[in-house]
Image (spheres, rainbow, N blue to C red):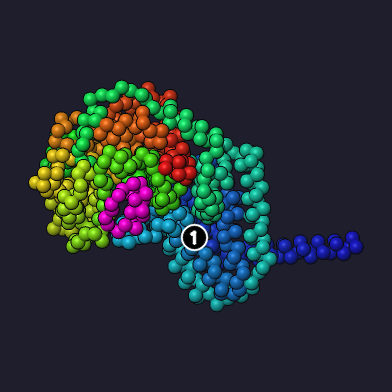
Amino acid sequence: MLAYNTNKEKRFLGTFRDTIKDIVHNKYFIITFILIFFKSILFMALISDDKANGINPMRVFYSYPPFLVYFSFILIFLSFGFLFSKKGQAVSFLILNVIFTIFVIGDLWYFRSNSSFISLYMLKMTSNLDNLGSSIISMVRLVDLAFIIDIVILLIMIIRDKQIKVKRNLVAFLIAFILPILYLTYAHIKIDTYNKGFENQMIFRKSWSPNQTISNLTPIGYHIFDSYNYYKESKPYELSSEEKKQTEDWFSKKKENLPDNKYFNSMQGKNVLIIQWESLENFVIGQKVNGQEITPNLNRILKNSYYFDNFHEQTWNGTSSDGEIITNTSTLPVREGATAFRYPGNQYQYSFPNIFKNMGYSTFASHPDKGSYWNWMPVLKSVGYQKTADSTNYNIDEVINLGISDRSYLSQYADKLKELKAPFLSYTVTLTSHSPFELPEADKTLKLPSNLENTKLGGYFQCINYTDKYIGDFFDKLDKEGILKNTVVVIYGDHEGVHKFYGDEVQKTSGLEPWMKENNREVPLIIYNDSISGEVKHVQGGQVDTLPTVAYLFGVNLDKDSNKTVGRNLLNTNKDFTVLETREFVGTESYKGEKEDMLKAIDLSDKLIRANYYK
């Protein structure tokens, strides 16, 4: 019996050794393995740069790189190729390489525009693909060719190779699939559970930075892990008793409880018009190019506005849709996917429409695009707007970029406002200044210097100037109708524009004035009415502060009345800081002690939205 078992073990070991030799000597497997490893390293190196167009050596790895983990995921991914034979096996490795490359390039493009990576949450966002072709193409960089060239070469090799005689190898598949899983299990227990790895090393633990998570796992491992998290986080979330207590404590600690000042209720009874201006950055306000004002109409209304010039975007994966939800509800977005697609039916007790509806206002939300785009119509209805209108309610006589041109839309929208019962609250967005910042030649009115012609920065200036022109016409039309005088107009940018999407190109543009180079995630917040004596407010704030700030002008003090709004009233505060979704704390040194508490708002908001806490 002993001899029998020994022979059995020898045969097993012999088969194992022979299979390992087959794997090692499999030309197309080895080539594909090396190529995917190279692309993984190149990808992780590129995302060390904020626009994935260069390499920042100090930010490629967050700890000693776990190469065995990298090899394991690549082996698992390629193991399925061994289930085919002859030329079919070589083709299968090529197909796996193509699939990997598609995901990596998609991740790169998404990262360049959103500082994050593709996830399963995006499957719910396919309605957004309409009219986005030019924006997607604008994310392409020359370095991306490095991910594609090998595929063409491999295809030619396989076509010409007449000597591919490999057999289907089930044992090779099992070895390449099971052994890496066993090692990953061991590494997870050793590093994640017992902390026996290198400093700052982790594997199956989600970091606050997606870059670190992908650096731990490679793109393959990241998407496997992300899919697991998608499944786990898709389940309804219930706050524990301890979490409810922590939430109450956080909101209570946030309150300043200051006595009311001159701004309180100063706009009582007036209409409210909120305009989310696509890609409006703060750096263009009051500036000139070639002696021409970029935003002459905005500059003009600042004389009768509260202008917040240290105001920051706080959007995340939902970009513009996040801007809408943050502004209307004073809460920060979820950390994975877009809030508008994951939780479109959530309700918010303290939202713009609900607060003003309780004061007897009619409420109306309107967009110059489809109601399904970024799921905005279901979201704004759930937020509380009584009436909504999308592109189907307008004459689509001119389309630029993502929807009806600002020229056509704002003119038609003014007619809609005439029909509203006063006092009213109306919310809308503009679209023409969306990336890739291209306009018909006839609509370009700025005379740009030669160094800005045919650049993204020059195109951005033209688009912002275009929208500014028709905002001016829109104001004039409202003024003639007698609406503007009795209306408080709130204008803010949904997120950065040229610096968000093309910051690398801006830095490479020659001859720029210093003010053109950086924007620091700032968007303007402008609150206008002709009864206001212009004031510039330098307090640090963010989009989450819009609701409590505007509500205060109408006699609603959310600092005292609400335990469900994350922002603070920027017209009555002793604090001078904000937090960004990148987990940056922006403020003076005197508030550094509050940094930890304020940064908790990011993850707290995520939980509270998932639990529908704000209803």
Residue depicted at x 57% and y 40%: 201
Q: Report if residue 450 lies within the magenta region.
A: no
Mark 1 secondary-structure assignment: helix
- Give the residue at mark 1: 100
Q: Percent from the top left, x then y, of residue 610?
A: 47, 45
Residue closest to the eye, 198 or 562: 562
- Quarter of the image with the C terminus in it: top left
Magenta-colored span = 369-390
Residue closest to the eye, 300 or 76: 300
Residue 451 in view here: no
Residue closest to the eye, 53 or 424: 424
Give the total of numbered labels: 1
Q: Quadrant of residue 524?
A: top left
- Quarter of the image with the N terminus in it: bottom right
- Seen as rendered, the residue at the extreme bottom is 162
Residue depicted at x 36% and y 28%: 560
Position of 276 with respect to 97 (left or right) is: left
Q: Amino acid at mark 1?
A: Phe
Residue closest to the eye, 156 or 128: 128
Position of 586 with respect to 550 (left or right) is: right
Q: Report if residue 381 lies within the magenta region.
A: yes
Q: Percent from the top left, x then y, of residue 236?
A: 51, 48
Position of 277 with respect to 40 (left or right) is: left
